[in-house]
Amino acid sequence: MTEAPRFKSSANVIASLAIYKVTYFLLIYLAIVLLPPIYSFENYAINIHGLTAPSSLEKFFMTWDTQPYLFISQYGYIKGLPVNAFSPLWPFMIRIFSYITGGNLLASGLILSNVFSIAALYGLHRLVSEQNDSQLADHSTNFHRTTEKASMKTL
């Protein structure tokens, strides 16, 4: 296989994954903004550790393990806290990348998690296409793309 078709195929795979992720993010945003009557604080509170109420749009994206990772990336490890159970690499990467995002740790984490997700799905596509064929690679990538949608909402 020559480099030109491989590059075109690679660019198509990466572009389709990026478009999928941006579309999914916009759907989440639109659901939060346009469907407030359906919103239930009780359901929201199940996914939150220590928040009393969502005070901003950002809080909707700070569920599950996002809060401990952002806490560590902002304050580091503090003796005796439960967040110390989380490994340091991800908060460190969020902190370093936040210098590019103007100090916004949440934006940093969302961008990084989605870039790494696209890279992993591209790697899967490339591996499967080299071992089998491009059709199976497309099916594998589409399957994993749709099953990892929860990672788009949080870090």
Image: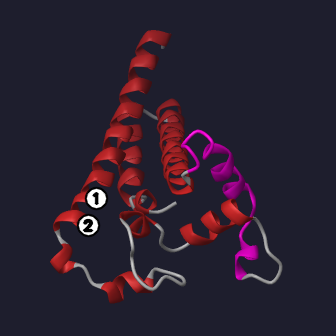
| Residue for point 47% across, 72% down | 63
- On the question of residue 53 being in view, the answer is yes
- On the question of residue 2 being in view, the answer is no
Return the residue at label 1.
29
Residue 6: x, y in percent? 45, 18
| Res. 32 mark | 2
Q: Amino acid at mark 1?
A: Tyr
Vertical relation: 29 (above or below) 81: above
**Res. 77 image quadrant:** bottom right
Residue 54: x, y in percent? 39, 76
Magenta part of the protein: which range? 82-103
| Residue for point 38% across, 40% down | 17
| Res. 37 mark | none
| Residue for point 70% across, 76% down | 83
Q: Mark 1 and mark 2: span between their CA atoms?
A: 5 Å
Question: Residue 86 in magenta?
Answer: yes
Task: Please tell me how crowded label 2 is: few (under 14), some (14-19), or many (20+) other residues with Cα within 10 Å.
Answer: some
* Nearest the eye: 72 or 47: 72
